Image (spheres, rainbow, N blue to C red):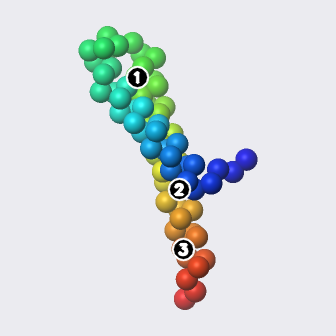
């Protein structure tokens, strides 16, 4: 199953927001629960992968449209 570029970008942005929210409020709201630290890292990793794959697929599409 392949995701389109727009879905990759939207999911990447949402997971980045979730990761930043967890990392921001982890210190005083969650009182150092390791599960939230794991979730913060997981969401940030997913956002990096999806955002980079979105950028690469857009670059490949632009390279195919413009002949040298």
Question: Which is closer to the viewer, label 1 or label 2?
Answer: 2
Q: Secondary structure at mark 3?
A: helix
Q: Quadrant of the C terminus?
A: bottom right
Left/right of residue 51 with respect to residue 57 in the rendered view: left
**Residue that badge 2 annotates:** 54
Percent of width and height locating residue 65: 59, 79
Earlier residue among tags 3 and 1: 1
Q: Residue at x 57, y 62 (%)?
A: 57
Residue lying at the far left in this picture: please name it.
28
Q: Is residue 65 above or below residue 50?
A: below
Q: Is residue 44 above or below residue 25?
A: below
Distance, label 2 to label 3, CA atoms, is: 12 Å
Left/right of residue 20 with respect to residue 68 in the rendered view: left
Number of other residues with Cα within 10 Å of mark 3, as a class: few under 14, some 14 to 19, many 20 or more: few
Q: Which mark is residue 62?
A: 3
Earlier residue among tags 2 and 3: 2
Q: Residue at x 26, y 15 (%)?
A: 28
Q: Secondary structure at mark 2?
A: helix
**Residue that badge 1 annotates:** 37
């Amino acid at each position: 199953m392949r995701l389109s570029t727009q879905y990759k970008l939207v999911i990447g942005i949402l997971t980045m927001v979730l990761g930043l929210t967890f990392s921001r409020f982890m210190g005083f709201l969650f009182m150092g629960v390791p599960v939230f630290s794991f979730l913060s890292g997981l969401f940030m990793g997913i956002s990096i992968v999806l955002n980079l794959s979105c950028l690469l697929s857009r670059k490949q599409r632009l390279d195919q449209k413009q002949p040298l």
